[in-house]
Amino acid sequence: MTTVEQRHRTTPPAPRRRSRRDEILEIAVGLFAARGYHGVSMDDIGSAAGVTGPALYHHFAGKEAMLVAALIPVSEGLLEGGRERVARQTAQAEAALADLIDFHVDFALANPAVIALHLHELDRLPEEPRRQIRRLQRLYVEEWVGVLTLLRPELEPAEARVLAHAAFGLMNSTPFLGGEVERRRRAALLRDATMHALTGR
C-alpha cells in the first residue's frame, strides 16, 4: 500500500467506552423494570452499583432524573433510526417497511427492560419530559404511517396509525417473552408476525 493510500485509508471509529454513569443507569433501569419505580430506592440502586450515596448523586439528581435519562434518548434514537431507514428506501415502500420492522425488532430484543419501563413508568415523569417523549413517539409513528399509506393506498392515515400501534404491541412484547426460543428465531417470529399484521400477507 502506498503512503498516499495509507493516509486516506479510513478505519471504523472505536466504540464509545461506557461511562460509570451509563453503567449506573443500566442498573437503575433493570431495577425499575423488575420492581417498579416506587419499589426501588436510591440506596437500592447505589448498593447494586457498588456506589455510595454521595457518589450516586454526583451522576443523577434522583430517581426521576434517571427515568428521564433512560427514556428520552431511547425515543430520540428510535425517531432518528426510523427516519434513516425510510430515507434510504424512498422508492420501495415494502423494503422501507421491512427495514423499519427489522430496526424495531432488533431494538425490542436488545432493550426489554427499557420497554417495560416505558410501558409502566412513563407517567411518573414530570409534564415537560413526558410531553417531549410523547411528541417524539408521535413523530416516530408517523414515519410508519407514511410508509404504510404508500404501500397500502386504500388505508386512511388514521387506519394506518391503528395498524402501526398494533405492530408496536407485537414487537414490544419482548419484556414478556421467556428464553425458551433462541434469539434469532424470536426475531424472525416477531418480524413475520408484524409484517403479516401490517400487510395481511
Image (cartoon, helix red, strand yellow):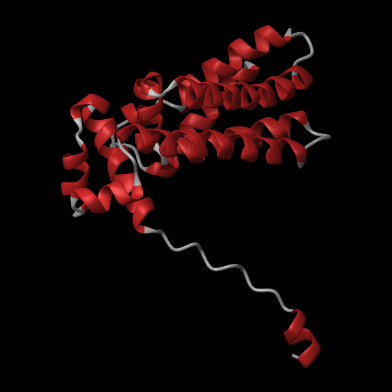
Residue at image point 55% right, 16% down: 165
Q: Quadrant of residue 132?
A: top right
| Residue 2 appears in the rendering | no
Residue at image point 38% right, 31% down: 174
Image height of 193 relative to 74, above or below: above
Residue at image point 59% right, 32% down: 101
Q: Nearer the viewer, residue 121 or 109?
A: 121
- Left or right: 176 as drawn, with respect to 192: left
- Left or right: 175 as drawn, with respect to 199: left
Image height of 77 relative to 166, above or below: below
Q: Nearer the viewer, residue 110 or 58?
A: 58
Horizontal and vertical percent position of residue 198: 61, 19
Horizontal and vertical percent position of residue 10: 70, 74
Q: Quadrant of residue 125?
A: top left
Query: Can you say which quadrant of the picture contains the N terminus?
Result: bottom right
Horizontal and vertical percent position of residue 127: 47, 19
Q: Nearer the viewer, residue 53 or 194?
A: 53
Query: Can you say which quadrant of the picture contains the C terminus?
Result: top right
Residue at image point 58% right, 21% down: 196
Horizontal and vertical percent position of residue 4: 80, 88
| Residue 167 appears in the rendering | yes
- Left or right: 55 as drawn, with respect to 16: left
Q: Quadrant of residue 99?
A: top right
Number of numbered markers: 0
